Image (cartoon, rainbow, N blue to C red):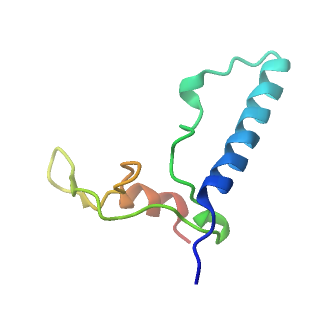
Amino acid sequence: MSLPDFDVLRAERNKQIDEFAAKMKAEDWEVSPCSLRSKDACYCACGSGGPCEHDWDGPEYMSEDGCLSSATCSRCGTTAFSHSMRFAP
C-alpha cells in the first residue's frame, strides 16, 4: 500500500486556508497569522477518515503535575493525547 502524497495534500490544505483568510480579511475580519495553522504542520484528516501524516515516535510528553503522559509526533510535536481528544469518535 502506497502512502498518499502529503506534500500535495498539505499544499491543498494551505491553499484553502489562505483563501479563507483572504475572504475573512475582505469582509473586514481581523485575521491574525498566529491564529492560522502552521503551513508546515502535519497533514491530518483523521476527523473525516482520511490519511494522517503524524509519526508518534517523538519524545514522551509529561505534564507538569505528572498526571498525564503522552506520545508526541516527531514531525510536528503535537501530543497523541490532544490528537485523540480532537478526533475521538
Residue ID at (69%, 17%): 30
Q: Quadrant of residue 69?
A: bottom left
In the rendered view, would you say 73 is above or below 88? above
Give coordinates of residue 7: x percent, y percent.
61, 53
Residue ID at (53%, 37%): 38
Q: Quadrant of residue 23?
A: top right
In the rendered view, would you say 20 is above or below 1? above
Give coordinates of residue 32: x percent, y percent.
61, 21
The residue lying furthest to the left in this view is 66
Q: Quadrant of residue 21?
A: top right
Residue ID at (52%, 42%): 40
Give coordinates of residue 86: x percent, y percent.
52, 57
> Position of 75 compared to 51: left or right?
left
Indicate the quadrant containing the C terminus: top left, top right, bottom left or bottom right: bottom right
Q: In terms of depth relative to the viewer, which is nearer, 84 or 46?
A: 46
Residue ID at (45%, 59%): 83
In the rendered view, would you say 4 is above or below 9? below
> Position of 67 compared to 47: left or right?
left
Give the total number of marks visible in the rendering: 0
Q: In terms of depth relative to the viewer, which is nearer, 84 or 49?
A: 49
In the rendered view, would you say 23 is above or below 17? above
Give coordinates of residue 52: x percent, y percent.
54, 65
Q: In terms of depth relative to the viewer, which is nearer, 11 or 35?
A: 11
Indicate the quadrant containing the N terminus: top left, top right, bottom left or bottom right: bottom right
